[in-house]
Amino acid sequence: MLNTLPDLHRSFAEQLKLKLQSDSRIHSLLAGGSFIHGGFDQYSDLDFVVVIDPLYYDEIMAQRMAFAGTLGHLLHAFTGEHVGEPRLLICLFGPQLLHVDLKFITLDMLTQRVEEPAVLFTRDNDALKR
């Protein structure tokens, strides 16, 4: 699935996946946008949904800017209140520019979807289907 992405995007997605798989507070990593709809090219952004164990949601939300800074050379990041989505962190990485959207939710919040995301990893596939 990731092997169809441009090198920069694939490398970032693989790194994010590994980082989140090693964090027991994270339930799943999902991808949306161009990743599932097609038309992905070198100028596309990456749209991720990070599904968090509810026990750690507030903790991770408070640390999400710092977390984004661990993913690469973070040029700028801001939250998505202006688009009506405060759970969204919009990030720009460099020096080769890469726009990444990280939406942080719990499993219960996943019932309200705008699209059916691709599962990059999960600790419980059955729970995602509910």
Image (cartoon, rainbow, N blue to C red):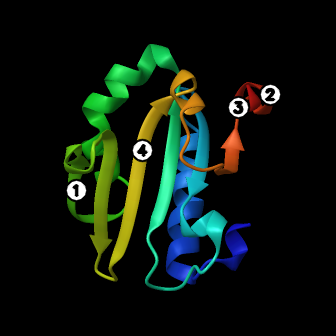
**Amino acid type indicated by mark 1:** Ala
Q: CA distance from mark 3 to mark 2?
A: 5 Å
Question: In front here: 6 or 23?
Answer: 6
For disc 2, the marked residue is: 126
Residue at the far right: name it.
126
Badge 1 or badge 3: first in the primary sequence: 1
Q: Residues within 10 Å of mark 3 (few under 14, many from 20)?
A: some
Quarter of the picture containing the N terminus is: bottom right
Q: CA distance from mark 4 to mark 2?
A: 21 Å
Q: Position of residue 120 (x, y in %)?
A: 67, 51
Question: In front here: 118 or 123?
Answer: 118
Judge depth for marks 1 and 3 and give the one in front: 3
Residue appearing at x 28%, y 67% in the figure: 92
**Amino acid type indicated by mark 2:** Asp
Q: Which mark is residue 103?
A: 4
Q: CA distance from mark 2 to mark 1?
A: 33 Å
**Amino acid type indicated by mark 4:** Lys
Residue appearing at x 46%, y 77% in the figure: 44
Residue appearing at x 54%, y 85% in the figure: 41
Residue appearing at x 63%, y 68% in the figure: 37
Q: Which mark is residue 77?
A: 1
- Helix, strand or loop at label 1? It is strand
Whether residues under marks 2 and 1 lie with C-beta atoms below 8 angstroms apart, the answer is no
Q: Residues within 10 Å of mark 2 (few under 14, many from 20)?
A: few
Badge 2 or badge 1: first in the primary sequence: 1
Q: Is residue 32 above or below residue 93?
A: above
Q: Which mark is residue 128?
A: 3
- Helix, strand or loop at label 3? It is helix
Badge 4 or badge 3: first in the primary sequence: 4
Badge 4 or badge 1: first in the primary sequence: 1
